[in-house]
Image: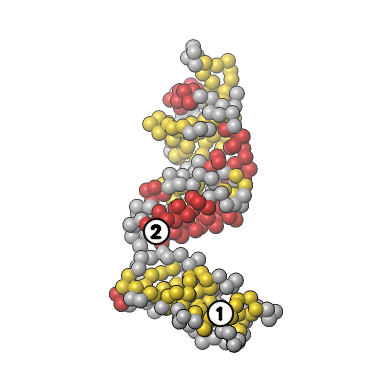
Amino acid sequence: MDYCSIFEFRNGVSMPYKMLTTLKNIEPHIETLTRSKYFAECRITDNGANALLYAPIHQESLHMVHRANIALMMAYKHGFVRMEILNEEMQHLNTPTMQLGDNTRCTLIKEQLPEGELLETAIHRLSRETLLQGLERLDAELRSYDISHNNLSINNIIVDSSNRWLPIRQYYTERGYGGDSNAIELLRELILKHTTPTTKVDLSATEPWCDMPQTTDGLHDGRCRCVTEHGVGFKDEYGRMVIKDRYLAVGDFMEGRAIVLSKANKMGLIDRSGREIIEAIYDRVQYSTDSGRSIVVCKDKCAIFDYNGRQISKWVDYEESL
């Protein structure tokens, strides 16, 4: 049989030397034993390393794990946590008699955990900027592997020493990116609202912050400034107008970004498609090609935005940051 009861699983991890096959020497942490609809779970220590051990408690459980492992093949090659299927690992228990079953065994799943801490803990220690960078990297990885974890939360992500976010409890994973959109946004909102330390705004001369540089008529990042009777926009290398002439002034494209000045005399930042990464509603925008960050000034306050136009520092007095 491909699944068991939570009672059998509790007994199995309580007596690994008697009930298990390859995991006889594990140290179980019985106090962590929990269950969901499809799996019972217990944290274990195996040869000094932490892992999660799952027991399928529903007839669909193993099918889910096999499907997830197929979807995760590329992610596994790049360091994602691996779910190892341990066929016939645990001896079945005859519940009425409390005796071992007639040589029937149950498959278990082991998920070796990486060194690091749960996001639930890390969020209290790391800066808002660092957390946002970790979130964006995870989202980019899910997109590149074309998968959806379908169970992302602060309890299902481990943050390692390099600030890489590694999802755990991956048995709901399916092929196809996009299933985590709501969870990603909820995590982003949580980070932005959290009172963790934030990066200080630094306007030092050590980073090449650019305002509105003097533009030329040549191509920069495949875009050329175009002035019409209506305003300023951009053409591509074939002379096609690809960004409407709706601005009062623009800067050259640098590393996929260009500073723009709206006809309301407000500044912003656009990408090569013309999308306003930073909406043109601010008094001043300075962009760094080295880091991809921007310093945004609004009245007497300023903050740092990342390459994707998301705010990664709190607003501070502009004069104090000089």
Residue name at image x 41 percent, y 73 percent: 296
Q: Work out whether mark 2 precedes mark 1 in sequence or the reverse, and give the earlier one.
A: 2
| Vertical order, 248 against 71 (above or below) | below
Q: List the residue tagged with mark 2.
A: 192
Query: What is the secondary structure assignment of the residue under circle 1?
Result: strand
Residue 206 seen in render: no
Is 17 in front, or is 242?
242
User: Can you tell which of label 2 and label 1 is closer to the viewer?
Assistant: 1
How far from the left and from the top, in percent, is residue 131? Answer: 42, 57
| Vertical order, 86 against 140 (above or below) | above
Is 93 in front, or is 243?
243
Q: List the residue tagged with mark 1.
A: 246
How far from the left and from the top, in percent, is residue 165? Answer: 48, 52
Residue name at image x 49 percent, y 47 percent: 152
Task: Locate residue 204: give its quadrant.
Answer: bottom left
How far from the left and from the top, in percent, is residue 20? Answer: 51, 25
The three-letter code of the residue at mark 2 reads Leu
| Vertical order, 213 against 307 (above or below) | below
Residue name at image x 37 percent, y 57 percent: 193
The three-letter code of the residue at mark 1 reads Arg
Disc 1 packing (10 Å; few <14; some 14–19; many ≥20): some
Query: What is the secondary structure assignment of the residue under circle 2?
Result: helix
